[in-house]
Amino acid sequence: MASPTGKSALLLGATGATGKKLLGELLGSPEWTKVGEYGRRVTPEAELPPAGRIAGKLEQKVIDFEKLGEAGLKDGRWDVVFITLGTTRAQAGSAEKFEKIDREYVVNACKAAKSQDPLHEQRVVYLSSSGANLSSPMLYPRSKGLTEQALARLGYSDTIVFRPGFLKNAERSQVRAAELIFGMITGAMSHFSSNVEIEVSLLAKSIMEAGILGSMGLPASVGASKAGEQGAQFTLIGNKGAGILGHAR
């Protein structure tokens, strides 16, 4: 259970480009007295920021997303669940495997992390993608859109979704040629619009801020909106709003 003076945070997807930055933000912030890093693999100790080595703050656990009943996700009584877990069709190997990882694993893990205590208010913050649309004929935006709506149906006290643009300066294990080309294009376009790209480190700060403030505490300047279906709505933050929120403090 989290300390009465601080919050507990569960991070799923901490080894990805945005997740590793978010993990550093969570560990370095006094807002969080407990941070859980659960995933198919976890960050090696040598790669953790100094704050990550503080005894008792970070809890790392390798889990099997096919056996979530054994993962103990509910045990932490997490106040905020952050999700930066995702993949691409190329990485997954097929459309079916992509949807399993990108949507099924995400939704099922959040369902497993939800507290059974009706008095325990929990927030979920999900990193989606610009163009997410559950009605899209294209696999990637459709999967993101369906995941957003499925998370909103889980009944968390607060559901916040980020739809950022191109992730600038993303540190990936494999170089993606298409991203290099697209990055040059969005870099040029960013001189005329704040909706096309965002620094990964800034996005991570923004995601953490949303977890702290919640939908009701977001500054009006962020321009957050409501999306989803009746009875399962969520707060939506676009690329421009994420940049503003990341600079909030």
Image (cartoon, rainbow, N blue to C red):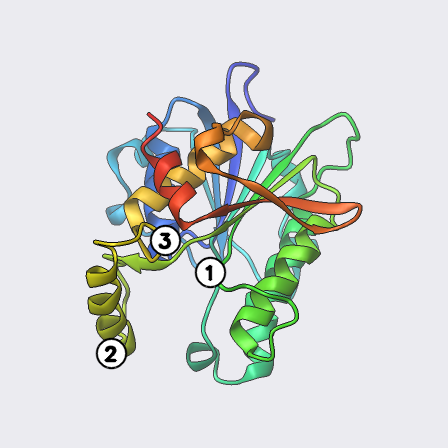
Mark 2: which amino acid? Ala
Residue at x 77%, y 31% (from the top left corner): 117
The quadrant of the image that shows the N terminus is top right
Q: From the viewer's perspective, is residue 61 above or below residue 91?
A: above
Q: Are marks 2 and 3 in contact (CB under 8 Å)?
A: no
Image spot of residue 215 (x, y percent): 58, 33
Query: Residue 139 versus residue 171: which sits nearer the camera?
Result: 139
Q: Nearer the viewer, mark 1 or mark 2?
A: 1
Q: CA distance from mark 1 to mark 2?
A: 20 Å
User: Considering the numbered disc 1 on the image, is that residue within a helix, a strand or a loop?
Assistant: loop
Residue at x 71%, y 28% (from the top left corner): 120
Marks counted in the figure total 3
Residue at x 54%, y 19% (from the top left corner): 3
Toward which corner of the image does residue 158 lie, by quadrant?
top right
User: Left or right: 189 with respect to 17?
Assistant: left
Within-10-Å neighbours for mark 1: few <14, some 14–19, many 20+: some
On the image, numbered disc 3 is attached to which residue? 195
Mark 1: which amino acid? Ser
On the image, numbered disc 1 is attached to which residue? 130
Image spot of residue 163 (x, y percent): 48, 54
On the image, numbered disc 2 is attached to which residue? 177
Q: Is residue 163 visible?
A: yes
User: Left or right: 96 with respect to 33?
Assistant: right
Image spot of residue 50 (x, y percent): 25, 34
